[in-house]
Image: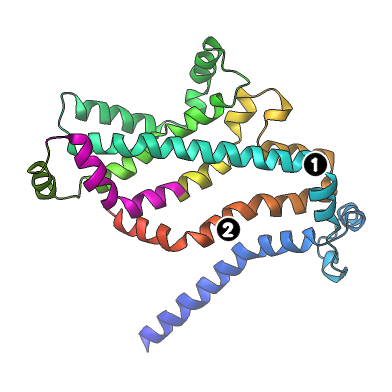
Amino acid sequence: MTRKISATTVVIATAILTLLFAAPLCMLIRYSLVAPPEIQATLAARDIFSVLSTPLSFEQFYELLVENYPFMRHFWLSLLYTVCTTGITLVTSIPAAFLFAKVKWRGRDTVFFVYIVLMMMPYQVLMVPLYKQFSDMNLLDNPLAVMLPAAFQPFWVFMLRQYTKSIPDSLMDAMRLETNSVFVCFRYLVVPLLGDCIAALAVLSFADNWNLFEPALIMLRTKALLPLPIILSQLMEADISIVFASSIVYLLSAVVLFIGAKEKLAQGVEVMKW
């Protein structure tokens, strides 16, 4: 009886939490399907539930996607930043994790300790040094000033290193019977074993980079170079009538990615348990 009551309590609590998390998203979807004039009237009257009785309309999406060309330009620009940053993250984090986990060299543990310290530092601490560095390199108002700090985050190296350490050394020794090349061991043994972890890293890195706000706000000055999160914040001040549809479009990329890669993400997170 106690087990049944406990199971029922867990189900009820889970349902309540799910509703609390889903309610804002449901309201966002419903508001995006309301005509702009009615949105303005609802916000002016401060009656947020009056939209439930209004007819469905795709006028916000038409105005946003067809008439508001700059929005889609920033959407594709933000997608380009995210894909490039995620690509750089994969190219650099995978070999770095291998070097920290399986290759013995002087000072390895000290350098990794510095990595851990950097991982614990928030971006606000590094903001001024990064700004000064990119200013000296003439990279301010350049997309590289946004992508490079995001691509070289120590957390991704730490995450991959933890799983790479679990690869048995006996496999590495067996591979060395065929070749003495560290690169060959890395390419044909380690990378295939890291497949699920790499997929999970790509998804998590994409989601993190898709929401870049502070670096772009500080490093970029030209409006044409701004990613979508900053444009959304400006849109809320300039035209509130289409901000709900723009939020749906902004969420769509991350949602589609998570739905399409949910199995790989689950498998990668599972094998990365330490």
At 33% from the left edge and 44% from the top edge, which residue is drawn?
159
Residue 46 figure quarter? bottom right
Location of residue 236 in the rendering, given as x and y in whole percent from the top left corner: 78, 42
Q: Position of residue 269 (x, y in %)?
A: 36, 56
Q: In the drawing, does residue 121 fall left or right of residue 97?
A: right
Name which residue lies at 10% across and 43% down.
178
Q: Is residue 193 magenta?
A: yes
Q: Mark on residue 197?
A: none
Q: Earlier in the sequence, mark 2 or mark 1?
A: 1
- Magenta stretch, main secondary structure, is helix
Q: Badge 2: few (under 14), some or many (20 or more) residues near its Cα, within 10 Å?
A: few
The kind of secondary structure element at disc 2 is helix
Q: How is the image coloured?
A: rainbow
Element at label 1: helix
Front in this rendered view, residue 155 or 40: 155
Q: Does 173 appear above or below 6?
A: above
40 and 12: which is toward the camera = 40
Q: Residue at x 53, y 16 (%)?
A: 134
Residue range (magenta): 180-202
Q: Residues within 10 Å of mark 1 (few under 14, many from 20)?
A: few
| Quarter holding residue 74 | top right
Residue that extends furthest to the bottom in the rendered view of this protein: 1
- Look at the picture and state if 49 lies above or below 64: below
Three-letter code for the amino acid on which mark 2 is drawn? Val
Residue 69: assigned label: 1
Q: Are marks 2 and 1 in contact (CB under 8 Å)?
A: no
Instruction: Looking at the picture, tell me which residue is in the foreground, 172 or 180.
Output: 180
Label 2 to label 1, Cα distance in Å? Answer: 23 Å
Q: Looking at the image, is 61 positioned above or below residue 7?
A: above
Tell me residue 232's x, y (percent): 72, 41
